[in-house]
Image (cartoon, rainbow, N blue to C red):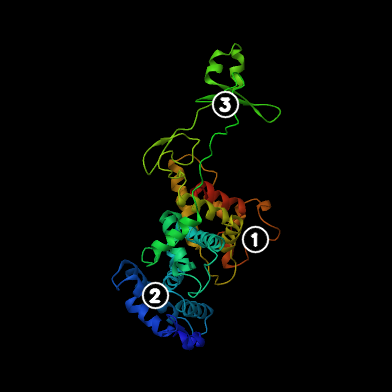
Amino acid sequence: MVVASFPAAKEMRGQRGQREVTEMMQSWCTEGMFTMGDPSSPTNAVLIPAVNFLFSHMNDLDPQDPQRIAFAKTLAYAAEDCQGVQAREIMRMYSDLTCQSRDLPQQILYFLSKYKEEALQAVITERHPKADLDHHHAKPWEQRPHLYSAYTEILGDQFGLPNLSGKADRFLAQATQQVVSAFPPPLPDALPVELWCDGCGAQPIQGRRWSKPRLDGDTYDLCQSCYDAAVDKDEHQSLSRIDPPEPWSCNNCTLQNEHTENVCGVCQHPRESSTSTQEQVKAEVEARIEWDRFMADLRADINNQSEHAERFISPGSLTNWAAGQCERDQDEEASSFKPHDIYFDYRPPNEFQENERPKEGENEYKPFLSTTVMRVILVHELQILRQI
């Protein structure tokens, strides 16, 4: 079936040239991925039904159908890579085919996951120079597929990235160490030693201090004793109270160290940051997500007017969700969103670009969102962007 749509697959080999990719695909259907356990393992128990569903769908299509050809090529090239890549590609295509059976929030989150994955791949490229080298020049845990498994495990399921093969990755421990090494914990900022009390001249100021900015860019500071002894109490109104940072406890010997020290005074163990690797990775990946492109592409998918358009977001899920808002609004305070806002005719013309409108015919009566309405749905109604 694959060769009928992609003849080149007949000559392709995987597992470092040891097996034909078509033979490997046959084994996926009954055995799954051998590196992820036996056919009854948690990973293969999900993977085997998914790949059989995928081949069943392909079999229903004409051999020259563009989707079938694209699926055949993707599977053949994935079979040349490691089994982590194979599993991810199978589950990605399976999710694409079954996405529209989910409700609207789940469909949008799945749509967003593609942009999160792009952002994560960009982080891997920047942080790991050996990620795309072959096995002659990089250890397996330094390569992209295993690094991806480590990153998705660190980020966790709540981040919304597909991670079927993460825990089953045999190089997960070593790859995770690569990620941790790429994100060294930042040390907390110590109190600047150049601060002194403008009352008694004490340097550094011990304990609580009271401060305000000066016109020259410096600060006016008082220690607690000078603040208490100040004659001009009106001046107190302009001073801000700043409490000293708490001492930190060494994770090696438990000694309490002053906040100004970055190394333990007894065992010389370095101070550890309160910012976890997960927090650092999450912040960097989120910063790389192309939010404007996500919003534009999501709106284009919903407003797609092509005949027999292949959409990620089904019109039915959007209309069902909007209809459900009628029942909600009877019990809750009125919302800025009204169910009929999803239709072109109920929104002001200035919310759309020039000549942007539904085509006459069947699509004329399907949802057609303005940028304003889509932002209201994502931010205020579903609160999807607030959750990221």
Residue 89, horizontal then vertical, whole percent: 46, 71
Name the secondary structure under disc 1.
loop
The answer to whether the residue labelled 1 contacts the one labelled 2, judged by CB atoms less than 8 Å apart, is no
Instruction: Give the image quarter of residue 232.
Output: top right
Earlier sequence position, callout 1 versus callout 3: 3
Query: Which residue is labeled 2 in the image?
Result: 51
Amino acid of disc 3 = Gln
Residue 261, horizontal then vertical, whole percent: 49, 37
Residue drawn at x 47%, y 88% is 10
- Foreground of the two, 216 or 303: 216
CA–CA distance between discs 3 and 2?
69 Å
Q: Report if residue 319 is visible in the image.
A: no
Amino acid of disc 1 = Arg
Indicate which label's residue lies in the foreground, 1 or 3: 3
The answer to whether the residue labelled 1 contacts the one labelled 3, judged by CB atoms less than 8 Å apart, is no
Q: Report if residue 287 is visible in the image.
A: yes
Residue 245, horizontal then vertical, whole percent: 48, 32
CA–CA distance between discs 1 and 2?
39 Å
CA–CA distance between discs 1 and 3?
69 Å
Query: Which residue is labeled 3 in the image?
Result: 203
Name the secondary structure under disc 3.
loop
Instruction: Give the image quarter of residue 215.
Output: top right
Label of residue 357 in the image: 1
Label of residue 151 in the image: none
Up/down of 242 relative to 307, above or below: above
Mark 3: few/some/many CA within 10 Å (<14, 14-19, 20+):
few
Amino acid of disc 2 = Val
Instruction: Give the image quarter of residue 352.
Output: bottom right
